[in-house]
Image (cartoon, rainbow, N blue to C red):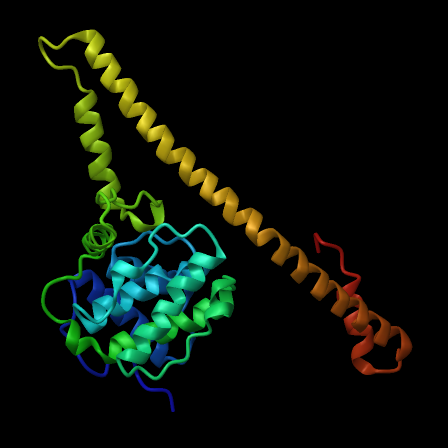
Amino acid sequence: MRRALGDRGESVGTAREQKILQELRCTAMDGAPLRASELLAWLNDLVDTDYGHVESCCDGVAYLQIFDAALGPGKVALDKCNFQPRGADDYVHNLALLSETLRRNGVSRVVAVERLAQGQLADHLEMLRWCYEFVAGYAGGMSGARYNGHERRKQAQTKAARLRGARAEPPSQNATLVPQAARAAAAAGAASQRAPREGADPVAQLKGEMELLADELEVELRERMEQQMRILQELPQLEAEREFYSDKLQSIASVCELHPELEVAAQLSAIISMPDDA
């Protein structure tokens, strides 16, 4: 029998988190699977992110911060996390760190690192549902101050830079890891800097505006390049999956042709030959 979510720790988090937890708990107790949109709402509110797709959790960052929030300070080595992952190798690094974190903290869950790094929706739905169940059952340890995921990311990056002996890196500009409120505040700050000031040198002011605009365009260009790189990296896998399922359909069609007497053969043939717009 499936355990009802949130058996313990009813006082966890903000009112918004309580509402999301209650909605998810009711969904789970009704026996229906948790929907991706509900899981994303819970995730983004818990760790201050802006993930738009469940499969984007393949970067491993979200899972690490879920357990940073649930287990408490010092349990997750966030300074070892790559907050600017650029491909499968970085995903594997973060997910391997997650696996080691769970093992070190006595959490009996096998993390399929290589599989999760591929970014398949079904795998991450299952993983995120398990994370929710874990947090709901562990909620008593999350009472008190709200977890500030955005600030924790900045702290981890600063610590990592200090350990390397390098200058502290600026906060991650990856849109997924910058919550909407922080982006709005940054935009408001940039707008106030562009506002005309009485007695200011117009040439210097124009130069400052151009520099701000150049910085914004650089950030946007980097995000678009990273997105394009992810698409190019995923393309071979998508093509391989297409061929895989195409071969299976051809095999099914061949069986239907060889055994037309089977009751299901006609139905399968009709489905296979169905036009795309049907």
Vertically, is 170 above or below 34? above
Residue at x 22% of width, y 36% of height? 186
Residue in front for this viewpoint, 240 or 3? 240
Residue closer to the observer: 193 or 229: 229
**Which residue in the rendered view is the most extreme toward the bottom?**
1
Q: Is 111 rendered above or below residue 68?
A: below
Image quadrant in which you'd find residue 105:
bottom left
Camera-side residue of 110 and 190: 110
- Residue 10 in sight here: no
* Residue 237, percent from left and from top: 61, 58
Return the x and y of residue 99 as percentages of the image width and height. Answer: 37, 73
| Residue 127 placement, left or right of 144 | right
| Quadrant position of the N terminus in the picture | bottom left
Task: Say which residue appears at 22% left-offset and 49% top-offset.
Answer: 165
The answer to whether residue 192 is left or right of residue 129 is left
Q: Position of residue 43 (x, y in %)?
A: 31, 62
Q: Can residue 93 be seen?
A: yes
Occupied quadrant, residue 182 = top left
Of all residues shown, which one is farthest toward the front? 165
Say which of 155 and 123 sits in front.
155
Count of numbered tags: 0
Instruction: State which quadrant residue 146 falls in.
Output: bottom left
In the rendered image, residue 52, in percent from the top left (x then y), is placed at: 40, 53
Q: Quadrant of the C terminus?
A: bottom right
The structure residue drawn at horizontal position 51% and vertical position 42%, both measured from the top left corner, is: 228
Residue under the point 67% across and 55% down: 239
Answer above or below: position of 69 versus 44.
Answer: below
Vertical side of 235 occupied by 240: above or below:
below
Residue 275 relative to residue 10: left or right: right
